[in-house]
Amino acid sequence: MLEEWLNPMKVSSFARDYLRTQPYASPSSANRAMPIFGWDTLDQLLTRNPPDVLVVAQGKLLELPSPRSLGEALDLLTSGVGLVIRRAEKVDDAVGGLAASVTQHIPGEVHVQLIVTPAGTYGFGWHYDDEDVFIVQTEGSKDYFFRDNTVDRERPAGTAPDFTRFGNEASPIGTARLLAGDWLYVPARWWHAAKCIEDSLSISLGIFPDPAWLASVNK
């Protein structure tokens, strides 16, 4: 599916010019991924096979019970509280298929999070991930902000990130507004944050590319 998202750019060109280097956004090219995570999917996940769920609001984890139905999830949204469903590729076949399709072009390990965010809020503040992140907007709209990490990029693997170092960052900030069917790539260890415009569903694919494949791309 990544090949379709990038068209007319070749995956090889994306890997050479953007992977681990700079963000990339594309409008409307991920429309076929929209049915993978809609409100009905959320209802099925919560009622059929309760997944690993974080309950979040304004950058904080909340000690609240996970919702067990769409109605309970919508009640949380009304209160300004969102959800992050972790390792969703393990509990939903369509999400698992999406993850597998991406590894056909970028070999490696993929972890998928399904993100539910209420309008006017955000789930997490400025942070970075060790993996490369592909974000697909499937419902609603959300503003994303991203900037290069010049203050903590060289953190040794296996050590905890220090997000407070963002206060020392001076790199320029880029933005992208994602509507349903749009997608955004954020390189590993780039700072990013988001603010929801309207109630939003999105798929976040975190990819750890195979080191040998990555080395071959960078030759």
Image: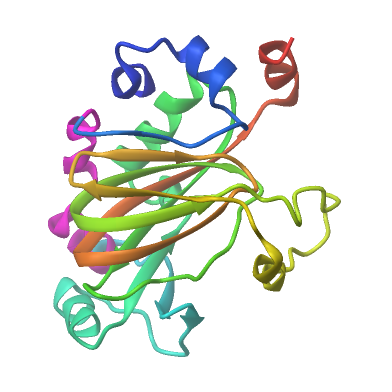
Residue 16 location, quadrant: top right
Q: Nearer the viewer, residue 41 or 212?
A: 212
- Left or right: where 108 falls relative to 42: right
Residue 127 is situated, as x and y percent measured from the top left of the image, at 58, 62
Q: Nearer the viewer, residue 206 or 168?
A: 168
Q: Nearer the viewer, residue 165 or 189?
A: 165
- Magenta stretch encompasses residue 39: yes
The colour scheme used to paint the residues is: rainbow
202 w.r.t. 73: above or below: above
Residue 64 location, quadrant: bottom left
216 w.r.t. 167: above or below: above
- Left or right: where 53 falls relative to 36: right
For the point 49% across and 82% down, the residue is: 60
50 w.r.t. 155: above or below: below
- Left or right: where 192 falls relative to 32: right
Residue 34 is situated, as x and y percent measured from the top left of the image, at 19, 41
Quarter of the image with the N terminus in it:
top left
For the point 29% across and 79% down, the residue is: 67
Q: Nearer the viewer, residue 92 or 2?
A: 2
- Magenta stretch encompasses residue 20: no
Q: Main secondary structure of the magenta part?
A: helix
Quarter of the image with the C terminus in it:
top right
56 w.r.t. 9: above or below: below
Find the magenta span and give its range.
Answer: 29-47
